[in-house]
Image (cartoon, rainbow, N blue to C red):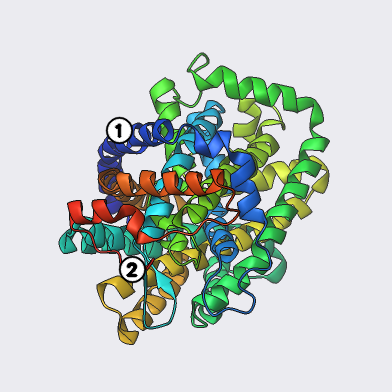
Amino acid sequence: MIDFAAIIGTINTYVWYIAFVFIVGLGLYFMAMLKGLPILRIHKTSRLALSGTKEGKHSHTVSSFEAFCIGLGARVGVGNIAGVASAIVVGGPGAVFWMWIFAIIGSASSFMESTLSQIFKEKKSDGQYHSGPAYYAQKGLGSRKLAILLALLIIITFGIGFVGVQATNSATALDGAFSKYLGLENGTVVFGAIIALAAAIIIFGGLKRIAVFSTRLVPIMALAWFVFCIIVVCCNIDGVVHAVEMIFTNAFGIQSVGGGALGAVMMMGLKRGVFSNEAGLGSIANIAGTADVKHPVKQGMIQSFGTIVDTLIVCSFTAFVILSSGTYDYIIDVYNGGVTDVGNATLVQNIAAATFMGEAGPVIISVFLLLFAFTSLIGYYTMSESNIRFIKDDKKFIFAVRILVIAVAFLSCVISTGQMETICDTFMAAMGAVNMVVVFLLSKFVFRAYKDWREQEDAGVEDPVFHRSVVQDLIDEKKANITEWE
């Protein structure tokens, strides 16, 4: 594993140079073409995201709000705790600033891919809508080979890579918090088995059970984390101003820490930011495509808001918990000098312990990490199922993917978090680069749909309705195949 991780690490460096160009460059282009929609119209996107809490209760299909909760559950995971800690330890406090910047840019990409996914969605044998990069690559560009490549990349990246990172981080944190009290010698294996079993119960219930589970747990989980972080920050209230100062001072390489010259700090901010909010990777597009809505743009706007919530709010809370505790040198000392395996939540656990919480700190963090990881794992399964149904809508294939995700959740607990994170990073970069190019090639569909939405809004329509005739000329031009929206 060490040799394999070293090879992957070398590949990872160069793949991310390519990914940076497409993820950031095209993200800026989309933001400009949308005239700052995700930020300037955040009052609208937030209202759409939070107003449909009662949607879908008496429907077999996944509602817009349920899709938002599944997407937020997938986003709000290990990256929001361990990922932020990793960014700070490796890239310095300035990496947090670049996480914010890339989240704002990524919110436009999230709008584009989610709207596109809605336009090209289709209903499968389970009665649910399915979509994502593979669907819009084949139906929009007419390339079955490219579509299968994207489907396989998503299954590998999220069904294996992201699931593995979530599971190994949460099992490691649980091991550190509980094994000494329970007398467990192989705590990570035991907790890995528990996580895998709990995931199996939800996964084998189908997409609707996943949707119901997410709508009940995710809002409570996110609110509880906010409250916890506020308590910890209040205990270190004198350090908040210093935390802000560290973030902006180190953001531009003015103060080099952790080897963090400007390029390195920016790259770490991008990696951990994208790992957290998943904007441009096509993952959230898979979830957005499951929603039963009247207009594709509605889900696009909702998911763009999810990107903002994930990074600018949830990740920021974690960053302030860490940085308000003291100087950067002190933070590294609290981390026990362990920069060799930065993919875990040890730093946040130890800082929580160093405040008024004492031994209860690591326990509380491990519980949050378990909840975050579990909701993410469920979301990643949803993506994997949509893509295996794309390749072949067969119960045997679906069963195989369910077993794969559950097995990875267990087996990844015997791999170090740092190695698992490197493997995941590499596939994430490849997925982001390919997906963003496909979204760019089909971007006219999204711009046309958004224009239709705005025209209906201006005409006083409260809940705009989409018809594929709006993009009929583009369908004819690209010989695209839109099967819904009649």
Q: Position of residue 105 (x, y in %)?
A: 46, 35
The mark nearer the N terminus, 1 or 2, is 1
Q: Position of residue 189 (x, y in %)?
A: 52, 70
Q: Quadrant of the N terminus?
A: bottom left
**Residue pointed to by mark 2:** 387
Q: Residue at x 47, y 71 (%)?
A: 410
Q: Quadrant of the C terminus?
A: bottom left
Q: Secondary structure at mark 1?
A: helix
Q: Residue at x 52, y 56 (%)?
A: 464
Query: What whole-number distance in Å separates the C-alpha atoms at marks 1 and 2?
Result: 26 Å
Q: Can residue 335 be spotted in the picture?
A: no
Residue at the bottom extreme, as displayed: 396
Disc 1 residue type? Val
Q: Can residue 396 be spotted in the picture?
A: yes
Q: Position of residue 427 (x, y in %)?
A: 31, 52
**Residue pointed to by mark 1:** 21
Q: Secondary structure at mark 2?
A: helix
Disc 2 residue type? Asn
Residue 478 left/right relative to 378? left
For mark 2, does the 10 Å Cα neighbourhood hold few (<14), some (14 to 19), or many (20 or more) residues?
many
Q: Nearer the viewer, residue 40 or 286?
A: 40
Q: Residue at x 61, y 53 (%)?
A: 48
